[in-house]
Amino acid sequence: FFASLAFLSSMMALVAAAAGLAGPMVSLPRPMPAAARPAVARISMQLEPSEEVSAAFRSLAIGEDESYDGIMAAYETLKAKNAGNTKAVIKLEVAKDRVMDHRLRQRMSGSLKPDRKFGEDLRPKDAKKPLITLPPFLEEIAELPKRTYLVTNIAVFGIFGLLPVFEASFVSSSIGLNFGIAMFRLYNRGAPDTGNDEDMAMRPVNKRASFLTFGICGLATALGGLLGQLLKPLLFFLSESAAISLGASAALCFACSFFKVQGE
């Protein structure tokens, strides 16, 4: 019995000595919970673009650190160069959407510095309603003019319309000039901008638009002249010819500013 106790004591001493030589126990790191691993993967994906996103950057010929304005400028430039090539335009649209989606995910993850086009600006904002709107039945033949277009028309027609105020013999010249200007402005309003005067001159004539332009301008001239005669008692400081010229000029200005004859 005592021999067995001595043997057990010696064995325990050997085990204790071995543990002391091995040094203190080191706790191994606990494995990452399964729920946390996808989040880390998502963040890493947002920081580094995928192969598809990198290909989208290359398709737009821009760097991966390009700004919002640079992305849109590159897209619009390539879209204009590939006008008429539907497949190429679709590929550019897909590439632009992928780049924008990548930028947004970077912004949401905090890996992208705030940009004036990302973040809060992406939240929908209430669009300002215009003060004046056209009734639905007039949308096909009328359109509200832009401010610069309207101001230009008022200045041009006002100058030529006032010619008979200084010389009564200029009535026919004033109405004729304004009639021609109104025809040109109304016919070309809404037409595609070619950016080249030669291309505009070679553009095929739209017979329907030409007929409507002549009819609207002719009717405006007649009604404007009649309105000038009716308002002559109020415009007592003007001669009858000057009142007719101003009335016709005002009507032509209104016609080419608010009506449209070119289709979509």
Image (cartoon, rainbow, N blue to C red):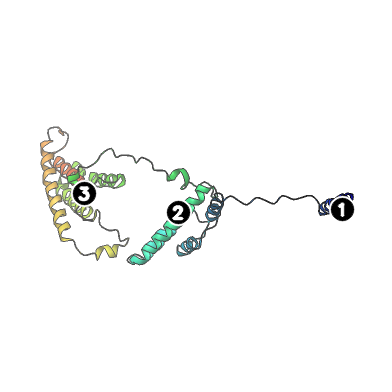
- Asked if residue 244 shows in the view, the reply is yes
Q: Which residue bears the numbered disc 2? A: 101
The amino acid at mark 2 is Asp
* Label 2 CA crowd tier, 10 Å (few <14, some 14–19, many 20+): few
Tag on residue 7? 1
Few, some or many C-alpha atoms within 10 Å of disc 1 (few <14, some 14-19, many ≥20)? few
Q: Which of disc 1 and disc 2 is earlier in sequence? A: 1
Marks 3 and 2, how far apart at CA: 44 Å
Task: Name which of mark 1 and mark 3 comes first in the sequence.
Answer: 1
Q: Residue furthest front?
A: 1
Q: Disc 1 or disc 3, which is closer to the eye?
A: 1
Inspect the image, locate mark 3, and give the three-letter code of the amino acid beneath it: Cys
Q: Nearer the viewer, residue 101 or 70?
A: 101
- Residue at 89 percent across and 52 percent down: it is 3
The image position of residue 151, as x and y in percent, is 29, 44
- Secondary structure under tag 2 reads helix
Q: Is residue 64 above or below residue 115?
A: below
Task: Say which element carries label 1.
Answer: helix
| Position of residue 196 in the picture relative to residue 230 (left or right) | right
* Nearer to me, 179 or 111: 111
Q: Nearer the viewer, residue 240 or 202?
A: 202
Provide the residue designation for mark 3. 256
Q: Label 1 is placed on what type of residue? A: Phe
Question: Measured from the top left, where is residue 60 in percent x and y?
Answer: 45, 62
Q: Is there a contact, CB below 8 Å, between mark 3 and mark 2?
A: no
- Looking at the picture, how far across and down is residue 19, in whole percent? 81, 52
Camera-nearest label, 2 or 1: 1
